[in-house]
Amino acid sequence: MAATQKEILDGLAEIVNEIAGIPVEDVELEKSFTDDLDVDSLSMVEVVVAAEERFEVKIPDEDVKNLKTVGDATDYILKHQS
């Protein structure tokens, strides 16, 4: 069953918390992974892999560079989940 935007946001918040140690409540749609949440490129790969597993979606490398904000990632997962 497809996840809602809220479920995806909550899931991404948990993933970012586990990988980067950012408090769950700080992960919001408009936040930039690099500028606001201090997620570096290596951590971003971990976030993507965890999101792919959690939401059963494939995020090709060429699409990862377009996921600048939490909202970008949420929208991408919403559109591409099976």
Image (cartoon, helix red, strand yellow):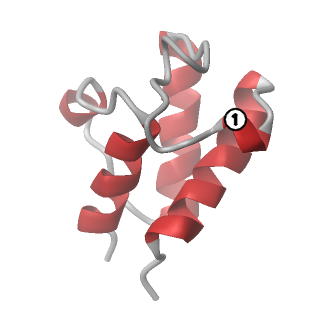
Residue furthest to the bottom: 1
Decide: few, some or many residues near mark 1? Use Cα within 10 Å; few <14, some 14-19, many ≥20. few
Pick the residue in front: 10 or 57: 10
Q: Please name the residue shown 58% across and 30% down the image.
A: 46
Q: Please name the residue shown 58% across and 61% down the image.
A: 54
| 30 relative to 82, above or below | above
Q: Please name the residue shown 42% across and 81% down the image.
A: 2
**Three-letter code for the amino acid on which mark 1 is drawn:** Asp
- Residue under label 1, please give it: 26
Question: Is 54 left, or right, of 33 in this rendering?
Answer: right
Question: Is 23 left, or right, of 56 in this rendering?
Answer: right
Q: Position of residue 12 (x, y in %)?
A: 59, 49
| 76 relative to 21, above or below | below
Residue 64 appears in which quarter of the rendering?
Answer: top left
Secondary structure, mark 1, is helix
Question: Is 82 left, or right, of 37 in this rendering?
Answer: left
Q: Position of residue 19 (x, y in %)?
A: 72, 29
Question: Is 52 left, or right, of 14 in this rendering?
Answer: left
Q: Position of residue 67 (x, y in %)?
A: 32, 33
Q: Position of residue 20 (x, y in %)?
A: 72, 23
Pick the residue in front: 49 or 5: 5
Pick the residue in front: 53 or 71: 71
| 55 relative to 51, above or below | below
